[in-house]
Protein backbone atom coordinates (compact mmCIF):
# COMPACT_ATOMS: atom_id res chain seq x y z
CA UNK A 1 0.00 0.00 0.00
CA UNK A 2 2.86 2.41 0.72
CA UNK A 3 3.92 2.71 -2.91
CA UNK A 4 0.37 3.57 -3.93
CA UNK A 5 -0.37 5.83 -0.97
CA UNK A 6 1.28 8.95 -2.40
CA UNK A 7 -0.36 8.29 -5.76
CA UNK A 8 -3.78 7.98 -4.17
CA UNK A 9 -3.57 11.20 -2.16
CA UNK A 10 -2.25 13.17 -5.15
CA UNK A 11 -5.31 12.28 -7.21
CA UNK A 12 -8.44 14.25 -7.97
CA UNK A 13 -10.64 11.79 -6.04
CA UNK A 14 -10.88 12.66 -2.32
CA UNK A 15 -9.13 10.12 -0.07
CA UNK A 16 -10.16 9.55 3.54
CA UNK A 17 -7.22 8.12 5.47
CA UNK A 18 -7.80 6.49 8.84
CA UNK A 19 -4.53 6.51 10.79
CA UNK A 20 -4.94 3.75 13.39
CA UNK A 21 -3.20 1.02 15.40
CA UNK A 22 -4.33 -2.54 16.13
CA UNK A 23 -4.03 -2.00 19.90
CA UNK A 24 -6.12 1.21 19.92
CA UNK A 25 -9.59 0.78 21.44
CA UNK A 26 -11.25 3.85 19.89
CA UNK A 27 -9.74 2.90 16.49
CA UNK A 28 -11.89 -0.25 16.53
CA UNK A 29 -14.98 2.00 16.30
CA UNK A 30 -13.98 3.43 12.92
CA UNK A 31 -14.43 0.49 10.48
CA UNK A 32 -18.26 0.41 10.61
CA UNK A 33 -18.36 4.21 10.38
CA UNK A 34 -16.03 4.19 7.36
CA UNK A 35 -18.15 1.43 5.82
CA UNK A 36 -21.18 3.74 6.07
CA UNK A 37 -19.19 6.51 4.40
CA UNK A 38 -18.04 4.18 1.60
CA UNK A 39 -21.61 2.99 1.06
CA UNK A 40 -22.78 6.60 0.77
CA UNK A 41 -20.05 7.87 -1.57
CA UNK A 42 -19.20 4.76 -3.60
CA UNK A 43 -16.39 5.44 -6.06
CA UNK A 44 -16.55 9.20 -5.58
CA UNK A 45 -14.06 8.90 -2.70
CA UNK A 46 -11.40 6.41 -1.60
CA UNK A 47 -11.02 5.18 1.96
CA UNK A 48 -7.65 3.94 3.17
CA UNK A 49 -6.48 2.64 6.52
CA UNK A 50 -2.91 3.42 7.61
CA UNK A 51 -1.44 1.43 10.51
CA UNK A 52 0.83 3.90 12.32
CA UNK A 53 2.95 1.12 13.82
CA UNK A 54 3.71 -0.36 10.39
CA UNK A 55 3.98 3.01 8.64
CA UNK A 56 5.76 5.23 11.15
CA UNK A 57 7.16 7.34 8.31
CA UNK A 58 3.67 8.50 7.28
CA UNK A 59 2.58 9.00 10.88
CA UNK A 60 5.58 11.27 11.38
CA UNK A 61 5.18 13.00 8.01
CA UNK A 62 1.58 13.98 8.79
CA UNK A 63 2.17 14.76 12.48
CA UNK A 64 -0.09 12.05 13.86
CA UNK A 65 -0.06 12.64 17.62
CA UNK A 66 -3.12 10.62 18.61
CA UNK A 67 -5.19 7.90 17.00
CA UNK A 68 -7.53 7.49 15.39
CA UNK A 69 -6.79 10.50 13.21
CA UNK A 70 -8.73 11.00 10.00
CA UNK A 71 -7.34 13.10 7.16
CA UNK A 72 -9.09 13.82 3.89
CA UNK A 73 -6.71 14.52 1.00
CA UNK A 74 -7.49 15.85 -2.47
CA UNK A 75 -4.86 16.71 -5.08
CA UNK A 76 -2.17 16.12 -2.45
CA UNK A 77 -3.63 18.73 -0.08
CA UNK A 78 -5.14 18.11 3.33
CA UNK A 79 -8.71 19.40 3.15
CA UNK A 80 -9.88 18.16 6.56
CA UNK A 81 -8.35 16.57 9.61
CA UNK A 82 -9.69 15.30 12.92
CA UNK A 83 -8.23 13.33 15.80
CA UNK A 84 -10.60 11.00 17.61
CA UNK A 85 -13.63 9.08 16.45
CA UNK A 86 -15.71 10.93 13.86
CA UNK A 87 -19.28 10.11 12.85
CA UNK A 88 -20.16 9.16 9.29
CA UNK A 89 -22.36 12.27 9.16
CA UNK A 90 -19.39 14.49 10.05
CA UNK A 91 -17.09 12.83 7.50
CA UNK A 92 -19.74 13.01 4.78
CA UNK A 93 -20.36 16.68 5.52
CA UNK A 94 -16.68 17.44 4.88
CA UNK A 95 -16.57 15.25 1.76
CA UNK A 96 -19.76 16.70 0.25
CA UNK A 97 -18.19 19.75 -1.35
CA UNK A 98 -15.41 17.69 -2.96
CA UNK A 99 -17.37 14.83 -4.51
CA UNK A 100 -19.43 15.10 -7.66
Image (tube, rainbow, N blue to C red):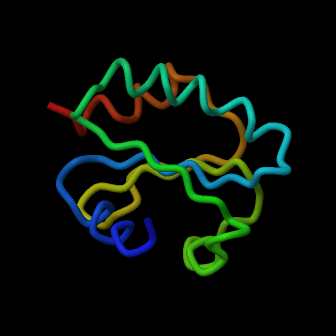
Percent x, y of residue 100: 14, 31
Which residue is at the far left?
100
Percent x, y of residue 20: 68, 52
Percent x, y of residue 75: 23, 62
Position above or below: 92 against 48: above
- Residue plotted at (72% across, 29% down): 29
Looking at the image, residue 98 sits to the left or right of residue 88; the answer is left
Percent x, y of residue 86: 62, 32
- Residue plotted at (77% across, 57% down): 66
- Residue plotted at (30% across, 25% down): 41
- Residue plotted at (46% across, 49% down): 48
Looking at the image, residue 96 sits to the left or right of residue 54; the answer is left
Looking at the image, residue 73 sits to the left or right of residue 28; the answer is left
Q: Quadrant of the N terminus?
A: bottom left
Position above or below: 87 against 85: above
Of 60 and 35, nearer the camera is 35
Amino acid sequence: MNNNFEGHIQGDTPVVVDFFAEWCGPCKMMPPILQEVKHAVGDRATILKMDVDRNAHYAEKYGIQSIPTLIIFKNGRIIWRKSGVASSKEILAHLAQYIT
